[in-house]
Image (cartoon, helix red, strand yellow):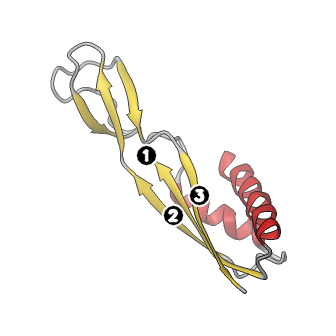
Amino acid sequence: MHELGICDALRKMVMRIAAQEGADKVTSITVEVGTLSGVVPRFLSDCWQAVIDGTEFDAVDMIVETVEGEAQCIECGERFVADLERLRCPNCGGNKLTPVSGTDLTLKEILVAN
């Protein structure tokens, strides 16, 4: 489950950014997860709780926003909303696709209280 490693890296990143900015307390973070990223949002949320348990981030909420993935068919050029469950072109049925968006995981926002 790579979500555990991702959450640990996010915690360290947020801790470093908060320290650089002189923030007293982080209250929540917002993460964008693309549907083609291979990251399962539910697992990410569960792992976040495990990673922050017993740390100074114990009460920090993680808000997960899902970003739809878009792909383009190499065979016919059709662009369409795709996810890892449906990787066929709706126009021609082809499976040779290029991801256009939705492959990223982004730390979008850190909410702090001073």
Query: On the image, which quarter does residue 53 sit in?
Result: bottom right
Packing grade of label 2 (10 A; few <14, some 14-19, many >=20) is some
Q: Is residue 72 left or right of residue 58?
A: left
When the figure is inspected, residue 46 is found, relative to residue 85, above or below; the finding is below
* Left or right of residue 77, residue 36 in this image: right
Instruction: Name the residue: 75% across, 82% down.
Output: 25
SS assignment at label 1: loop
Amino acid at pointer 2: Val
Percent x, y for residue 55?
84, 75
Q: Which residue is mark 2?
A: 64
Q: Amino acid at mark 1?
A: Thr
Q: Earlier in the sequence, mark 3 or mark 2?
A: 3
Q: Is residue 1 visible?
A: no
- Label 3 vs 1, first from the N-terminus: 1
Is residue 6 left or right of 54 when viewed as pictured? left
Residue 65 placement (x, y as % from top left): 46, 61
Residue 58 location, quadrant: bottom right
Q: Separation of disc 3 and disc 1 at Cα?
A: 13 Å
In the image, 74: left or right of 44? left
Disc number placed over residue 35 in the picture, else none = 1
Furthest residue to the top? 75
| Residue sitting nearer the eye, 19 or 98 | 19
SS for dot 2: strand
Q: Nearer the viewer, residue 97 or 19?
A: 19
- Residue 113 versus residue 84 in the image, above or below: below
Q: Which mark is residue 43?
A: 3
